Amino acid sequence: MPRTRITIGVLALQGAFTEHIELLHAAAATIPDHDFSFPEVRTPAELARCDALILPGGESTTMSLVAQRSGLLEPLRDFVKAARKPTWGTCAGLILLSESANRTKAGGQDLIGGLDVRVSRNHFGRQVDSFEAGLHLDFIADPQRPFRSVFIRAPVVERLLPHVEGVQAEEASKEDTVVAPSVPVREEGRKALSDHVEVLARLPREARALGKSATAGELGEAGDIIAVRQGNVFGTSFHPELTGDARIHAWWLKGVVEAVEQRDRAS
Ligand SMILES: NC(=O)CC[C@H](N)C(=O)O
């Protein structure tokens, strides 16, 4: 018996949230017998109604500042890290979901955390160094058809960190690095926590040549990690919401339905 309603919020403080909502609607059409809603989330009360959440691309420092002013930072940490509800961050969203981020602005920024990784912000250089790449993603439908992805001042995952509850001294001691505060995983979330980070995609070799004016040193190496998952938390360096291809959204939504139905059965 399918659940009547699954609410998947999109954090709408800043950035490309509308595009995500459009693609979620397209993805929902591939999953019959479910009643989805995709509200914009700007307040703790709106977040509390969600079964899952997307953090869009945009500017992570601005987003965390607005989240803090809106009283959303702690509820977001609780949602992602304590309850471990399904969450996907794209680009700036990936930065916010990382336990550690370097190349942060002076004064740092607040991270939510949830993914045991360190990201390198603005890894490919400035806005003019944005590029597109055709990715071969073996987890989506029709995997032999490249997935056109846009990288705009994108981060990459530069290191996978071991899972420990609490800030790691080694991470916290780096000068240009910020770390997410620790939040103990609740019992309901523990079932959804897989201990290790899976690498789901790396930058293909051809993509290196596509960066426009970046110097070789600024450009990413082929093989840079651009998509990771740890239990219910998923992150991509690029913007799948900007190219009108709903295959990643359809794959993620299917996983959300499974996670939510599993949770319902257990409760
Ligand atoms: N397109 C993006 O989301 C860019 C992210 C941006 N570099 C940041 O630090 O937030």
Image (cartoon, rainbow, N blue to C red):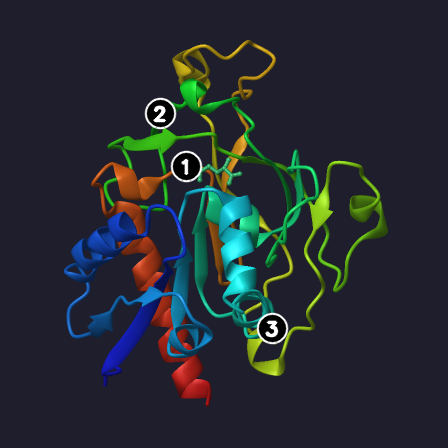
For marks 2 and 1 on the same chain, the one whose residue lies earlier in the sequence: 2
- According to the picture, the residue beneath numbered tag 3 turns out to be 82
Identify whether 256 is placed above or below 33. Answer: above
* Residue 255 on image: x %, y %: 36, 63
- Check residue 133 in the rendering and tell me which mark sits there, or answer none: 2
* Residue 261 on image: x %, y %: 36, 78
Under mark 3, the amino acid is Ala
Identify whether 228 is placed above or below 266. Answer: above
Q: Tag 1, which secondary structure?
A: loop
* Residue 134 on image: x %, y %: 32, 26
Tell me if residue 85 can be seen. yes
Tell me if residue 94 can be seen. no
Front-lying residue, 153 or 117: 153
Under mark 1, the amino acid is Phe
Residue pictured at 59% horizontal, 63% vertical: 194
Taking the image as shown, residue 166 lies to the left or right of residue 69, namely right
Taking the image as shown, residue 85 lies to the left or right of residue 9, namely right
Whether pointer 2 and pointer 1 mark residues with C-beta atoms closer than 8 Å, the reply is: yes
Residue pictured at 53% horizontal, 17% vertical: 219
Front-lying residue, 8 or 60: 60
* Residue 47 on image: x %, y %: 42, 72
Whether pointer 2 and pointer 3 mark residues with C-beta atoms closer than 8 Å, the reply is: no
For marks 2 and 3 on the same chain, the one whose residue lies earlier in the sequence: 3
- According to the picture, the residue beneath numbered tag 1 turns out to be 238
Q: Quadrant of the N terminus?
A: bottom left
